[in-house]
Image: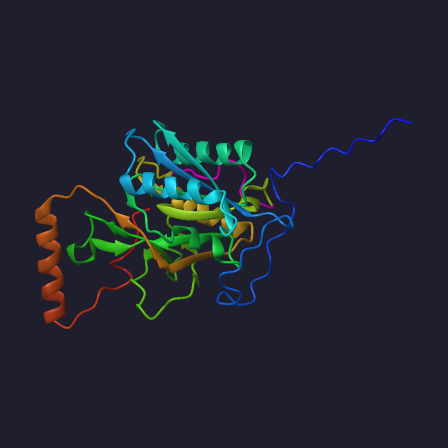
């Protein structure tokens, strides 16, 4: 009698539904793989349009690959650089395809090629009760009120459902917290998020939308977050994972920002959510 061969089921997309949110601060620092006795897989990727690799990215990639084989390391890492793909939405979608087709990792971690990567970047993948987790990184918005040009990439929604930058969390805030919108500059995404719609966001979830005059209405980060919310996924920020951000700036902008902040503080004023509205 011929032996029956059992074909191993593909792990391209997990069929497990998103776990209900009980407490975003509970169960921290636990590593649960999708299969028993298997290390959690992390696929770290960088959309790179310039062809140059940031030193901290190269260093973290090297450390990750060197750690994979160690028994005491709770993760197994894969690394990927997507070179020469423009614009950012297309580059991110190419990374999603590589993640799904070339790996069986549990998490996709993406950071931009101008990010300064901290040693604890992998902690984004330790938040059990969230599906998409962003680190904190500073952003510079030059075409808004000068006192609001320096911001951080965690976002809220106002009463009119407009996206705005939340203020920098206090140093006492150490546990991950939920947000409606995440930035994509330094982000970790569970594999199940890329399930076909409506259970997931699909395999090309990053895209821009435009107004009739072709101005950007919403960037790929906002649209990705909206799709995640529609599918019922949980978005969060880990305040202890802080990336640096390398930017070329006109230094007069820095002086303009400093003077505006100084004048605001002398007048006893504070920046409002209206002033921190995102341009998309």
**Residue shown at 38%/51% (left/top)?**
121
Q: Is the magenta stretch mostly helix, strand or loop?
A: loop
User: Would residue 219 be seen by someone viewing this image from the given angle?
Assistant: no
Q: Nearer the viewer, residue 8 or 151?
A: 8
Residue in front for this viewpoint, 242 or 200 = 242
Q: Give the range drawn in magenta.
A: 199-208
Q: Can residue 51 be seen in this view?
A: yes
Query: Residue furthest toward the right?
Result: 1
100 is within the stretch colored magenta: no
Q: Is residue 262 above or below residue 78?
A: below
Residue 196 is situated, as x and y percent measured from the top left of the image, at: 59, 39
The image quadrant that residue 239 belongs to is bottom left
Give the left or right position of residue 240, taking residue 275 as reference.
Answer: right
How far across and how far down the image is residue 55, in percent? 27, 39
Image location (x, y in percent) of residue 209: 39, 39
Q: Is residue 131 left or right of residue 6?
A: left
Instruction: Please tell me whether residue 280 is drawn above or below residue 151 in the rendered image.
Output: above
Q: Which of 160 and 77 is in front in this view?
A: 77
- Residue lying furthest front: 71
Residue that protrudes farthest toward the bottom in the picture: 268
Image quadrant occupied by the N terminus: top right
Task: Return the x and y of residue 170 as percentages of the image width and height.
Answer: 30, 68
């Amino acid at each position: 009698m011929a032996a029956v061969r059992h074909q191993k089921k593909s792990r391209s997309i997990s069929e497990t539904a998103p776990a209900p949110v009980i407490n975003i601060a509970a169960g921290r620092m636990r590593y649960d793989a999708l299969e028993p006795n298997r290390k959690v897989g992390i696929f770290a990727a960088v959309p790179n349009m310039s062809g140059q690799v940031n030193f901290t990215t190269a260093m973290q990639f090297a450390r990750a690959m060197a750690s994979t084989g160690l028994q005491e390391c709770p993760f197994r890492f894969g690394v990927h650089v997507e070179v020469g793909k423009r614009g950012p939405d297309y580059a991110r979608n190419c990374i999603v395809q590589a993640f799904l087709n070339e790996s069986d990792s549990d998490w996709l971690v993406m950071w931009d090629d101008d990010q300064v990567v901290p040693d604890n970047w992998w902690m984004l993948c330790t938040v059990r009760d969230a599906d998409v987790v962003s680190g904190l990184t500073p952003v510079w918005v030059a075409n808004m009120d000068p006192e609001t040009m320096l911001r951080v990439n965690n976002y809220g929604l106002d009463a009119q459902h407009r996206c705005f930058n939340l203020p920098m969390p206090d140093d006492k805030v150490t546990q991950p917290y939920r947000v409606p919108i995440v930035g994509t500059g330094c982000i970790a995404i569970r594999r199940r998020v890329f399930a076909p719609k409506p259970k997931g966001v699909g395999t090309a979830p990053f895209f821009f939308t435009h107004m009739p005059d072709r101005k950007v209405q919403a960037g790929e980060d906002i649209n990705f977050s909206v799709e995640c919310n529609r599918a019922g996924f949980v978005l969060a920020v880990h305040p202890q994972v802080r990336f640096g951000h390398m930017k070329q700036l006109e230094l007069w902008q820095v002086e303009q920002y400093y003077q505006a902040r100084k004048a605001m503080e002398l007048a006893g004023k504070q920046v409002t959510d209206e002033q921190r509205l995102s341009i998309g």
